[in-house]
Image (cartoon, helix red, strand yellow):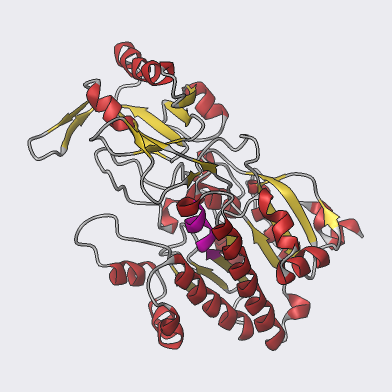
Amino acid sequence: MSLDGLSTIDFPHLRRLPHFRRLIDSGSFCRQVRGIYPTQTYPLHASLITGTYPHRHGVYANTLFQPGRSSPDWHWYRRFLKAPPLYDIARRAGLSTATLLWPGAGRSANRYVIPEIKKTRPGQSFPLLVLSGGTVPFILHMLVRYGSLLKDLSYFHLDNLTTAVASRLIRKRKTELLLLHLLDLDGTRHRHGFRSREAEAVLADQDRRLARLFEACRQGGGEAETAFVVFGDHAYRDVHTRIRINAAFRRAGLLDFDRRGKLAHWQAWANCCEGSAQVTLRDPEDAGLRGRVEGVFSELRSGPEGLIDTVYNRARVLEMKVGEGIDYILEAGEGCYFVPQADGEVVAPAEEGFRAAHGYHPDRPGYSSLFLASGPGVSRGVETKAIRIVDIGPTLAALLGLEMPGSEGRVVKEILEEERS
C-alpha cells in the first residue's frame, strides 16, 4: 500500500493510530527511506517497482517532455517503463496481480487494473480514458458494487473506492500481489501544508482503511499467508512562490509563438517537477545558446528572493542517474517551485490552495519517507536505519520468492525472517 506523501515526520502520529501501531509492533520498519531525483510520484513509483533509477526505467518526471504544453500528458501507461516492473515478473511466474490507481500501470497486463489517469487536454472523455487504460469487465463490475462510494472524484472518495475494491480482492483471495495507491494525504498536503492538522486527519482516515484491509484478510482466511507492506514516496516543502521558468526563456527570446499563441519554435524548454525543473536545449552543442540559458539562470539566482538554489549541469544529471537528454536541472530555492506555463510573470505568488510541493532533491533535510512491513516472512521488532526506495521492489520480490534481475536496489535482508534465522 503506497500512501502518497507519507513522510518520516508522520511516524510518531502513526504510533498513536491503532492499526498502524499494530503494523509497526508486529513487524519491521524504516524511518529513513531515501527517494530518487526528482521526488515526484511517477518516477518514484517507477523506481520502487523496478528497483532501478530513472536513467534505467525511463520515467524522468511525472509528465512527458512536451514543449509548448502547459498541461503535459503524464506517464500513465506501462509502455513508458524501460525496466521490468515487479508485477510483470510476478505475472510471468504464474502469480495473479492487481494494480489499483498504481502510477504508471495503465494498459498493463495485470489481471486487475484500475488505472490512475486524468484529462490533460480538451475533448478527452474521462470514462473512456479509465476504461481504455484498465481491465474493462473488472472496472464495470467494481463500479456496480462500490460506485455509491464515489460521491465525486475527490481523493477522499477515490481512496474509499479503491480500498473497498482491494478489500474484496483480499477477501476473495484473488491475487498474490496487490498494489494499492492511496491519494488523499498527498492532495491534502498540497492544499493545506506539510505539517497541517488536515494531514493528521487524513492519516486517521488511512488508519481506518488499513483496518478494512486487515479485516478482509481475516474474513478470507489469508492471515497466515499475507504480508502487509506500507510505504511513502516523498515529503514536502511548504511554498509561497511559483516560478514560470519557461516564461523566463520566452522573455529571453528562446521561445517563439505564432499568432494563435502556439509554440512555433523553441531553443530551451523546462519540464517542471515542482521542486525542480529539467531543462533541455534544442542544440546542446551550441555554446552561444548555453550562454544565453545560463544567463537566465544567473538572473534568477542573483535576486534577493533565492528563487534557484542549485543548477546541475549535464555531467551531474548523469551522475545522479536522472536520465539522458537533460542538459540542466534547476533546484528551486526555499519556499519556491516551478510551473510549466510560458506566459505571465516569471515570478508570482503560489497558486491559491497550493501550500506545499515536492520534486526536490532527495537529500534535502527532513525529506525522507517511511517503510512498514508485517506478516509471514517479515521479522518482528526490527528497525533498519536507512534504505533507498529502489530497495523496496527487490524486497517485495523476495517476500514472494522471486528475484529482480538487473535491479540497482538490494533486498533488505535484515527484516526478513529466513535471512535472520
Name the foreground residue: 421 vs 293. 293
In the image, residue 20 above or below residue 71: below
How far across and down, in percent of the image, does residue 151 sit? 39, 77
One can see residue 92 in this view? no
> 23 or 402: nearer the eye?
23
Region of the chain picked out in magenta, as a range: 181-189
- Give coordinates of residue 133: x percent, y percent: 37, 66
Q: Is residue 57 left or right of residue 6?
A: left
Q: Is residue 106 visible?
A: yes
Which residue corresponds to the image point at 50% horizontal and 69% vertical from the top-left?
A: 100
The vertical placement of 136 against 273, above or below, is: below
Quarter in which the C terminus is drawn? bottom right
Q: Is residue 186 left or right of residue 410?
A: left
Write the residue at 60% across / 73% down: 209
What is the quadrant of residue 116 in the picture?
bottom left
Residue 108, x across and y down, in percent: 45, 64
Q: Main secondary structure of the magenta part?
A: helix
Q: Residue furthest left?
A: 259
- Please state if 248 lies on the left or on the right of 369 as rendered: left
The vertical placement of 22 against 387, above or below, is below
Is 339 on the left or on the right of 260, as rendered?
A: right
Question: Is 13 above or below relative to 171?
Answer: above
Quadrant where the N terminus sits is bottom right
Q: Residue at x 67, y 49 (%)?
A: 9
**Outermost residue toward the right?**
421
Residue 183 painted magenta: yes
The image position of residue 403, as x and y in percent, is: 69, 56
The tally of labels here is: 0
User: Residue 405 versus residue 328: which sits nearer the camera?
Assistant: 328
Which residue ends up furthest to the front in the rendered image? Answer: 197
